[in-house]
Image (cartoon, grey):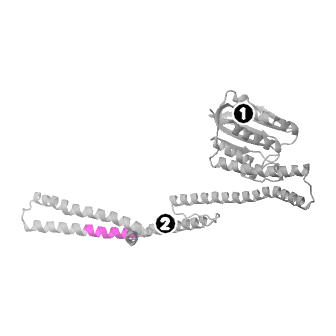
C-alpha cells in the first residue's frame, strides 16, 4: 500500500504546485535544448567564422575567444533559466490566487448542495469567462434541483391528501359496520365501491405516468389518418358533452390526407384526457373545439375551450403531478389529478410535445399536441 501511494505524495497536490511544476518542466526542457545547441552546434560554427575572418588554426587568441564564447553561452542560459523560474513562480502564485477563491466557492456550494441545501448559489466572482460560465451552470443546476425538490414535496403532500379522503371513508364505514351503526346495504356497497375504485385508479395512474416518464411505455405504432384520430375522440366524448350541454366541434379542413405514425390507443387516451379536462372547466352552453393543423413536417391537434381559463402560474405547473390551482379550476373529485401529466408523458414518448396556453381567467384555455408526420 505504501509503495503504491508514494508517487502521489511526490507529486505536488496544490494548484500552485502543479502550475509551477508544469512550467518548470517546460523551462528545463527549453534550457536543456538551448544548452545542447550552444554546446554542440554553436562552437563549430563560431570556430569556422573565426577561421574565415583570418585567425590561424592553432593561435592562442582563437582558443581564448572560443572559451569566452562557451562561458558567455552557459552564463546566459543559466541566467535566463533562473529569471524564467522566478517569473514562473510569480505567475503560478498570481494564477493560483485568481483561481483558488472561486474554485473554493464552487466546491463549498457543491458540498452544501450534496447535503440537501438546494437554495445554495454561487455568487458572481469576476474570475473570467470560463469560471463565470461554470458558476452560472452550477446555479442553473441548483435551481432545477430545488424545483424538483419542491415538486416532490408538493406531490407527496397532495398524494397524502388524495389518499386521506377514501381511506377516511373506508375507515368510517368499517367502524360503523363493526359497531353496528351502519348496515351493509346498497348505499354502503356503492360508497365502498366508489372509494375502493378511486384508490385503484390512483394507483394505476401513478404507475402509468411513472412507466411513461421512465421510457418503459410500450407503443404499438401504426400509420393513422389524422382525421380518424380526431373523429374517434369526438365519438368517444359526444354523449358526455351532450349530457352537460356543452358543444363539441371538430375542424379537420386543414389536415385532409395527413397521416401520423402513432399508437392509436395511447393518443386516443391523450385526447380523451384533454377533452375531459375541457368539459370539466367549460360551463353549460360553452364550446370545445378540436382543430387539426400542420406546421412544416409536423401535425398539430389543438383542444380549445371558452371556459374558466388559466393564470400564468397555473400554466407553469399545468403538467405537474397533483398540482392544485385556485378554486376556479378545482378538478373533478373523481379524477386522480395526473391526467395531464400522463398525457404529456405519452406524447413525449411519441417524440412530440404537449403545451398549454390561455389568455387568462375566464378566457378559455387550449392544449396543443405536436406530432411528426408519417
Q: Looking at the picture, does residue 287 appear above or below residue 47? A: above
For residue 264, say whether it is visible: yes
Q: Which mark is residue 229?
A: 1
User: Mark 2, mark 1: which one is toward the viewer?
Assistant: 1
For residue 318, say whether it is visible: no
SS for dot 1: helix
Secondary structure character of the magenta stretch overall: helix
Q: Position of residue 45 (x, y in %)?
A: 16, 58
Q: CA distance from mark 2 to mark 1?
A: 59 Å
Q: Position of residue 289 (x, y in %)?
A: 78, 36
SS for dot 2: helix
Residue shown at the point (34%, 63%) measured from the top left: 26
Which region shows up in magenta?
76-91
Is 124 situated left or right of 56 in this image? right
Is 67 situated left or right of 127 in this image? left
Residue carrying label 2:
99
Q: Looking at the picture, does residue 13 appear above or below residue 317? A: below
Task: Determine contact: label 2, label 1, CB under 8 Å.
Answer: no
- Choose between 54 and 13: the one closer to the eye: 13
Instruction: Examine the structure image and report whether residue 292 is included in the region drawn in magenta.
Output: no
For the residue carrying disc 1, how many other residues have a C-alpha within 10 Å: few (<14), some (14-19), or many (20+)? some
Mark closer to the chain start, 2 or 1: 2
Amino acid at each position: 500500500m505504501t509503495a503504491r501511494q508514494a508517487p502521489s505524495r511526490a507529486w505536488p497536490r496544490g494548484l500552485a504546485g502543479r502550475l509551477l511544476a508544469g512550467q518548470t518542466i517546460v523551462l528545463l526542457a527549453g534550457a536543456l535544448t538551448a544548452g545542447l545547441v550552444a554546446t554542440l552546434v554553436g562552437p563549430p560554427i563560431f570556430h569556422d567564422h573565426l577561421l574565415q575572418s583570418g585567425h590561424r588554426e592553432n593561435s592562442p587568441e582563437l582558443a581564448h575567444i572560443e572559451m569566452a564564447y562557451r562561458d558567455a553561452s552557459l552564463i546566459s542560459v543559466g541566467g535566463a533559466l533562473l529569471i524564467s523560474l522566478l517569473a514562473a513562480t510569480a505567475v503560478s502564485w498570481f494564477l493560483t490566487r485568481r483561481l483558488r477563491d472561486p474554485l473554493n466557492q464552487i466546491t463549498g456550494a457543491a458540498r452544501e448542495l450534496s447535503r440537501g441545501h438546494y437554495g445554495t448559489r454561487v455568487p458572481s466572482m469576476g474570475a473570467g469567462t470560463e469560471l463565470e460560465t461554470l458558476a452560472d451552470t452550477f446555479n442553473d443546476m441548483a435551481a432545477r434541483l430545488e424545483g424538483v425538490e419542491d415538486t416532490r414535496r408538493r406531490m407527496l403532500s397532495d398524494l397524502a391528501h388524495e389518499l386521506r379522503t377514501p381511506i377516511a371513508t373506508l375507515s368510517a364505514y368499517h367502524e360503523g359496520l363493526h359497531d353496528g351503526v351502519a348496515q351493509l346495504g346498497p348505499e354502503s356497497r356503492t360508497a365502498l365501491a366508489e372509494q375502493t375504485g378511486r384508490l385503484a385508479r390512483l394507483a394505476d395512474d401513478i404507475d402509468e405516468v411513472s412507466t411513461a416518464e421512465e421510457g418503459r411505455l410500450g407503443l404499438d405504432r401504426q400509420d393513422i389518418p389524422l382525421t380518424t384520430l380526431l373523429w374517434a375522440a369526438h365519438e368517444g366524448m359526444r354523449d358526455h358533452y351532450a349530457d352537460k350541454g356543452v358543444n363539441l366541434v371538430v375542424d379537420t379542413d386543414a389536415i385532409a390526407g395527413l397521416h401520423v405514425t402513432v399508437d392509436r390507443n395511447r393518443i386516443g387516451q391523450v385526447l380523451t384526457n384533454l377533452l375531459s379536462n375541457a368539459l370539466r372547466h367549460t360551463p353549460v352552453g360553452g364550446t370545445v373545439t378540436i382543430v387539426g393543423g400542420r406546421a412544416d413536417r409536423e401535425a398539430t391537434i389543438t383542444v380549445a375551450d371558452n371556459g374558466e381559463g388559466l393564470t400564468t402560474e397555473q400554466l407553469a405547473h399545468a403538467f405537474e403531478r397533483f398540482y392544485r390551482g385556485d378554486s376556479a379550476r378545482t378538478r373533478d373529485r373523481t379524477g386522480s389529478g395526473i391526467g395531464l401529466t400522463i398525457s404529456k408523458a405519452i406524447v413525449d414518448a411519441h417524440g412530440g410535445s404537449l403545451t398549454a396556453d390561455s389568455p387568462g381567467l375566464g378566457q378559455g384555455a387550449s392544449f396543443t399536441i405536436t406530432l411528426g408526420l408519417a
